[in-house]
Image (cartoon, rainbow, N blue to C red):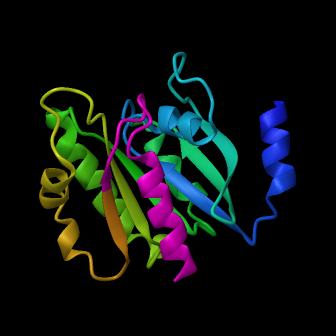
Amino acid sequence: MGLLSLLRKLRSAPEKELRILLLGLDNAGKTTLLKQLASEEVTQVTPTAGFNIKSVVSDGFKLNVWDIGGQSKIRPYWKNYFENTDVLIYVIDSSDRKRLEETGDELAELLLDDKLRQVPLLVFANKQDIAGSLKASEIAECLKLVKLKDRTWQIQGCSALEGTGIKDGMDWVCKSIKK
């Protein structure tokens, strides 16, 4: 733990602790996004075979972020992590048009689970820095997010590699929890 991390912890006394579940298909950029949130180096990121957990202090909240691997063999185990989730963050590779239907199906299945009912949803449309990527609005349309009536949701374009758009998404998370 670095000096900066220690200073941040000393300075902040979070009002509330939140459990955030970070899901998405393999290669969507979940771990890179998590590393950006934790202010870690993102040049060397390896695929997550199980899970990663990081705690980040943001806007008076201690965010315990659970990054679960997205390989097809791991996805059936996602449900083991649903309990006590305060916010679901779903990461999509905006440049991977071939897997858009697959990622949409996985998200739809998640949203049907009783343990995630009414849990706020943030969709990060990642890899916006890649030419030809779908815009966040196009992904929202493809996934029919506007039809979600049982929860608050937001879609945010981002580049986990460059760190753009992440703060805006996390600001939404903190604001939606305060409500």
Q: Residue at x 24, y 53 (%)?
A: 104
Question: Which residue is at the front of the view, 3 or 77?
Answer: 3
Question: Which residue is at the front of the view, 150 or 173?
Answer: 173
The image position of residue 109, as x and y in percent, is 33, 61
Q: Is residue 29 magenta?
A: no
- Relative to residue 29, is residue 94 drawn left or right? left
Residue 1 visible to the viewer? no
Figure check: 92 above or below 96? below
Question: Which residue is at the front of the view, 171 or 69?
Answer: 171
Q: Is residue 176 magenta?
A: yes
Question: Residue 151, located in which quarter of the rendered image?
Answer: bottom left
Q: Residue at x 82, y 50 (%)?
A: 9
Total marks in image: 0
- Relative to residue 64, is residue 153 drawn left or right? left
Q: Quadrant of the N terminus?
A: top right
Question: Which residue is at the front of the view, 87 or 57?
Answer: 57
Residue 3 visible to the viewer? yes
The image position of residue 44, as x and y in percent, is 54, 16
Q: Residue at x 49, y 57 (%)?
A: 170
Figure check: 58 above or below 166? below
- Relative to residue 120, is residue 149 drawn left or right? left
The image position of residue 159, as x and y in percent, is 36, 36
Magenta-colored span:
156-179
Q: Residue at x 44, y 47 (%)?
A: 166
Residue lying farthest to the top in this orientation? 44
Figure check: 156 above or below 133? below
